[in-house]
Image: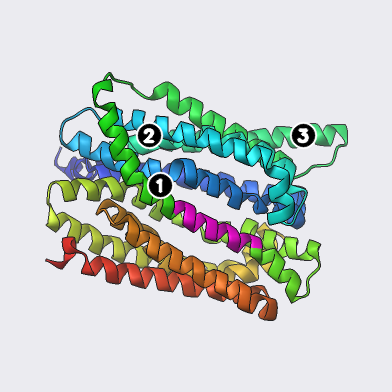
């Protein structure tokens, strides 16, 4: 039927269809996570949220070491193998072998070093128990991440989308059940409840992914694929580890510098929890779309580069920049109009609303930076993204170290804005100078 032809045209486009599916499930996960954050803020309080958020730098650092770079490599080479008509599963096998070995090492390091990290580095002894629980999720996250990368490379997003939603639902249900049990027995509710939810969520996502993936025999090409995945993932992993290490230092320094500003330990943790557990997740809510686009851009750009389709690369970059700016400025306007309502009625915290108002201006630059980094990865410039991300992180750390002890948390909010402007503007400049777009 003629009137269905536009729909068929767009629904058959892997980039658009994959982005739409990831966005839909990502939006559902964000909505669930949004109410989950509200639930946590009311059950464990702002200080509990601060303690809970303190362990995330350790988790992201471990995940970056054992999975993040490998997932990107699996996605890139799966797309290239599929484009050349070869067996793409060999990339998945190579990624799983590398990631599993690294994740077991990272999990053991976190588990046995939990007390040292919590006391010496995080300056919060209550994080030790949480880190031991958290270490159990790393091998599960690594398996889940590799399988997702494989399907992203094929530009088939059904499995990653469903597993993402399943993970979020299982996490929330687990935490709610633990809360009900504690409430019925008159026991106090702590941040450990939320960490167990993370473990159960990762377990459900990993189990689902393993049961649905289709395996094939292509062991003869495994050594060559291991070499390719390893070679490409090393700079990416170094990128992610270095950036996450600096991000971890950033998160750890915030409560410390807030205490230098004059806050007591409990107040510093509360402000940290309000910022990272309430305000930032709200600001990141619209990024579900740009994150989905970023995931699909990498294999799409990799295929276009392999096929030397410069026109497609040009068109994709232009439309990406235009779309990110429109979404970013619309998000900024929305948060400027609703920050009071969000703070007072959703989180029952006025400070959260004020932080959201200030952070709203980072939206256009944050969305642009995320998507352009993915394009740079697809074009084969991992060192460039390392430079950009590290520059932004170092700028924020300098602001925390020099200005937060003098001007308080507001200095950090402005530092975040400055770092996002820096990385997005530099990404546009460097992408424009790349050989794929210079011709």
Quadrant of the rendered image containing residue 239: bottom left
Residue 33 seen in the current view: yes
Name the chief secondary structure element in magenta. Answer: helix
Say whether disc 2 or disc 1 marks the residue closer to the N-terminus.
1
Where's the C terminus, which quadrant? bottom left
Above or below, 21 against 219 in this view is below
> Percent position (x, y) of residue 176?
70, 36
Please provide the residue range marked out in magenta.
240-252
Q: Are marks 2 and 3 in contact (CB under 8 Å)?
A: no
> Percent position (x, y) of residue 435?
17, 63
Quadrant of the rendered image containing residue 32: top right
**Disc number placed over residue 180 in the picture, else none:** 3
Q: What is the CA distance from the residue labelled 2 to the residue labelled 1?
A: 25 Å
**Residue ID for mark 2:** 95
Q: Secondary structure at mark 1?
A: helix
| Number of other residues with Cα within 10 Å of mark 1, as a class: few under 14, some 14 to 19, many 20 or more | many
């Amino acid at each position: 039927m003629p009137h269905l032809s536009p729909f068929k045209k767009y629904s058959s486009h892997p980039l658009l269809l994959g982005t739409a599916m990831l966005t839909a499930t990502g939006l559902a996960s964000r909505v669930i996570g949004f109410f989950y954050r509200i639930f946590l803020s009311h059950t464990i309080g702002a200080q509990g949220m601060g303690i809970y958020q303190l362990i995330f730098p350790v988790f992201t650092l471990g995940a970056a070491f054992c999975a993040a770079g490998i997932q990107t490599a699996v996605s890139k080479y799966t797309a290239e193998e599929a484009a050349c008509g070869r067996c793409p599963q060999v990339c998945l096998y190579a990624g799983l072998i590398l990631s599993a070995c690294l994740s077991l090492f990272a999990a053991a390091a976190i588990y046995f070093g939990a007390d040292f990290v919590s006391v010496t580095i995080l300056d919060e002894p209550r994080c030790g128990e949480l880190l031991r629980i958290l270490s159990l999720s790393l091998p599960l996250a690594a398996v889940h991440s590799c399988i997702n990368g494989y399907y992203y490379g094929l530009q088939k997003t059904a499995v990653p989308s469903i597993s993402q939603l399943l993970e979020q639902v299982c996490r929330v249900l687990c935490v709610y059940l633990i809360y009900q049990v504690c409430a019925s027995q008159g026991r106090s509710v702590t941040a450990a409840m939320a960490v167990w939810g993370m473990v159960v969520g990762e377990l459900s996502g990993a189990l689902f992914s393993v049961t649905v993936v289709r395996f094939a025999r292509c062991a003869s090409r495994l050594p060559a694929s291991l070499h390719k995945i390893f070679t490409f993932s090393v700079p990416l992993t170094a990128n992610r580890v270095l950036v996450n290490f600096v991000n971890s230092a950033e998160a750890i320094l915030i409560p410390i510098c807030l205490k230098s500003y004059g806050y007591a330990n409990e107040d510093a943790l509360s402000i940290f929890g309000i910022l990272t557990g309430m305000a930032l997740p709200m600001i990141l809510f619209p990024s579900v779309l740009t994150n989905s686009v970023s995931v699909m851009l990498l294999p799409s750009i990799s295929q276009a580069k392999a096929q030397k389709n410069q026109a497609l690369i040009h068109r994709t970059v232009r439309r990406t920049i235009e779309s990110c700016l429109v979404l970013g400025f619309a998000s900024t306007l929305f948060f400027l109009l609703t920050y009071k309502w969000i703070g007072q009625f959703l989180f029952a915290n006025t400070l959260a609303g004020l932080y959201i108002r200030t952070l709203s201006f980072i939206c256009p630059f944050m969305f642009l930076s995320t998507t352009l980094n993915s394009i740079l990865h697809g074009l084969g410039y991992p060192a460039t993204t390392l430079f950009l991300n590290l520059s932004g992180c170092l700028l924020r750390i300098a602001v925390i170290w020099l200005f937060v002890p003098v001007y308080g948390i507001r200095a950090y909010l402005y530092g975040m804005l400055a770092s996002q402007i820096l990385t997005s503007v530099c990404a546009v400049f460097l992408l424009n100078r790349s050989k794929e777009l210079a011709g």
